[in-house]
Amino acid sequence: MAGASILVISSWLRRPWPFGYRGSLAASESSWQRGGGAQMAGLTGSAPGWCLDRQAESGPALALAPSPGSLGTLLCPEVSSTLLSPPLLLRSAQIPDRANLSFPPSIPHSCGPAQAGRGYASGAGVVGGGGWDQGDGLAGPHHPIRRLPALRRAGKGNPGQQFGRDGRARLAMRLSLLLLLLLLPGPQPTLGMEDDASFPHLGESSQPPPRACPPRCSCPRPDTVDCDGLDLQVFPDNITRAAQHLSLQNNQLQELPYNELSRLSGLRTLNLHNNLISSEGLPDEAFESLTQLQHIYVAHNKLSVAPQFLPRSLRVADLAANEVTEIFPLTFGEKPALRSVYLHNNQLSNAGLPPDAFRGSEAVATLSLSSNQLSYVPPSLPPSLERLHLQNNLISKVPRGALSRQTHLRELYLQHNQLTDSGLDATTFSKLHRLEYLDLSHNQLAAVPAGLPRTLAVLHLGRNRIRWVEAARLGGLRGLRYLLLQHNQLGATGLPAGALRPLRGLHTLHLYGNRLDRVPQALPRRLRALVLPHNRVAALGARDLASTPRLAELNLAYNCLASARVHLRAFRRLRALRSLDLAGNQLTQLPSGLPAGLHTLRLQRNQLRTLEPEPLAGLHQLQELSLAHNRLRVGGIGPGTWHELQALQVLDLSHNELSFVPPDLPEALEELHLQGNRIGHVGPEAFLSTPRLRALFLRANRLHMTSIAPEAFLGLLHLRVVDTTGNPEPVLVRLPPTAPHQPRAAGP
């Protein structure tokens, strides 16, 4: 088509129109499509989907197919300059499907050859030879479409016969004039039209655009992007610049692209936990633009060295469980807001920690360097520390003055190292005036360290080689609450009488596994828990426990106690005792004079053959009694043995020599262990005295299919568990029906 061309205009140069709209017109020559004898120009850009339809009648018609929510402007490119008055403006919301508009015959309309009687080439109900069609969803003649007065409905005629060579010349001249006028600056926009940012413009929607979120990720808030556990191997794109919290943990990332990370300048939290990121894949330059980053989590990756630079704004840094051998001065230095640093489970040696590693970071409260390869306590630790984790290293000494500046330290963990007495001195802990928790367990100490702070509440010295406890070294610890000395080598003489008496506030004393042959004498009077299992205590005298009247828990399990060497008044003064553990001794009968306030009594793995009611008399508060792994028979249980155990809920008689269920069990019983006995029959009256029973264990006995009487469980409305596995034959058990729900009476 020689004289025809399609005009591409990027904007109307902010020219105001009476309708108060501004917009863009975009038509491309390549978008002409041929189909069914009609030629169409597909408008692109801000008005996608608009089409130009040619009619073979008196004037060229415009067939419009709008995109929802868009605003479009159409102008036939070959009309005269008379169309420079405001063109037809249409809102797509006003056009349900397609509309047909036409120019009057007086306007030249050689927009290209067309065939008579042909309309838009696709779709049902498309406009035909001239006029409105009431087809599928088409706009009728009264549809609210704004158009210029000069426009009218299409008439008859053939536009291809109206122009000759002269017409094309006039057309070219008019097009030139049109282009010139379009390029001239228009009048300034009027207030309320162009200055209204909320007013919908051409190609824009009145609704806010959807928030960008990477595929498969979730963005619960405008500033949060969560891509956890997606097995990502590549850093996701399309992350909004507004992101403040980005989580990429539990993926397969090996590197972070500099250009993607550096543009997220508003990040406050970056979680890269549990990936495959190496030091080469973590560019230092990327952190330079993250000036607001506060939390970074890179634990469980493949870092061999720490980043050389982290942002000054940092508050929490987690680089644990990597392969880090070295950190740098600006990794954690010059961070005034830094509070917590986690470097445990790495391969750091003292050579990998520079002397100025924390210079300028005066707020660090928590530092974890556990499970590394440190051979001594680093001397350049932050003075602001409150919690210091150095356990599981190779530390054999604390250099003099290494802990002299940490006056705010409250918790110090040095367990599982190689500390000896020579690696500490009297000044090692003397400046730690706020220290409350000190763990020196699993080392090689032979004595209690000197110069311990008076503020200590917990001192853990278990699993060392301590042979002697010097009273003077503990004398000032009047606030000490928990002293743990288990698995040392104190023996019969390592804990002199009264050595612990100055510890007036002591609550719990752990001494198990020390080869003690008697209960230590002159213990602190306020002691509440004495834990002495796995020693060699063979006797309990009348006054061995007299100095500790407030004991609530006494554990003497797995010693060498025999009934003949337990005094009748050994427990007389322990009126506050609630738990007594005498398991694993050599008792042949129940001890006498048990405190009436006992809640738990453990006597398993002794040599009990008989039970008499007298030792259990008065134990009205006893809730749990364990007699397992003894030699009890039903005939050895005296009548009325259970009579006064009115609160007993758990009774363990397993692994004895019982041939049937003992009679007259306590009424409050809820859990009964009878496994591992010789029971061959359960009669109909076996559980008449235990209506609250919930769980019954009868496994590994001598029961057969019909050994349990059908009436045995009648009345046990709370019974939920009956274990009969491990018997010679499968045992059929029919549980009683559950108790009907009783509605509560309404209050007044």
Image: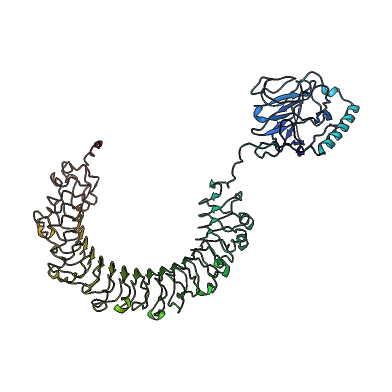
- Where residue 249 appears, as percent x and y from the top left, is 51, 55
Identify which residue is drawn at 68% across, 33% down: 71
From this viewpoint, is residue 219 visible? Answer: no
Decide if residue 626 is on the left or right side of residue 507: left
Q: Quadrant of residue 149?
A: top right
- The scheme the figure's colours follow is rainbow
Q: What residue occupies the far right of the structure in this picture?
A: 166
Q: Is residue 738 above or below residue 496?
A: above
Between residues 725 and 83, which one lies in front from this camera angle? 83
Between residues 526 and 124, which one lies in front from this camera angle? 526
- Where residue 501 appears, as percent x and y from the top left, is 26, 74
Decide if residue 448 is on the left or right side of residue 618: right
Q: Quadrant of residue 96?
A: top right
Could you tell me which quadrant the N terminus lies in? top right
Identify which residue is drawn at 21% across, 46% down: 731
Q: What residue occupies the far left of the structure in this picture?
A: 639
Q: What residue occupies the far front of the structure in this picture?
A: 191
Decide if residue 348 is on the left or right side of residue 288: left
- Where residue 458 appears, as percent x and y from the top left, is 34, 68
Total numbered circles: 0
From this viewpoint, is residue 646 visible? Answer: yes
Q: What residue occupies the far top of the structure in this picture?
A: 156
- Where residue 59 appears, as percent x and y from the top left, is 79, 23
Q: Quadrant of residue 628?
A: bottom left
Identify which residue is drawn at 22% across, 63% down: 581
Could you tell me which quadrant the C terminus lies in? top left
Between residues 510 and 636, which one lies in front from this camera angle? 510
Between residues 305 and 657, which one lies in front from this camera angle? 305
Q: Is residue 135 above or below residue 4?
A: above
Identify which residue is drawn at 89% across, 26% down: 164
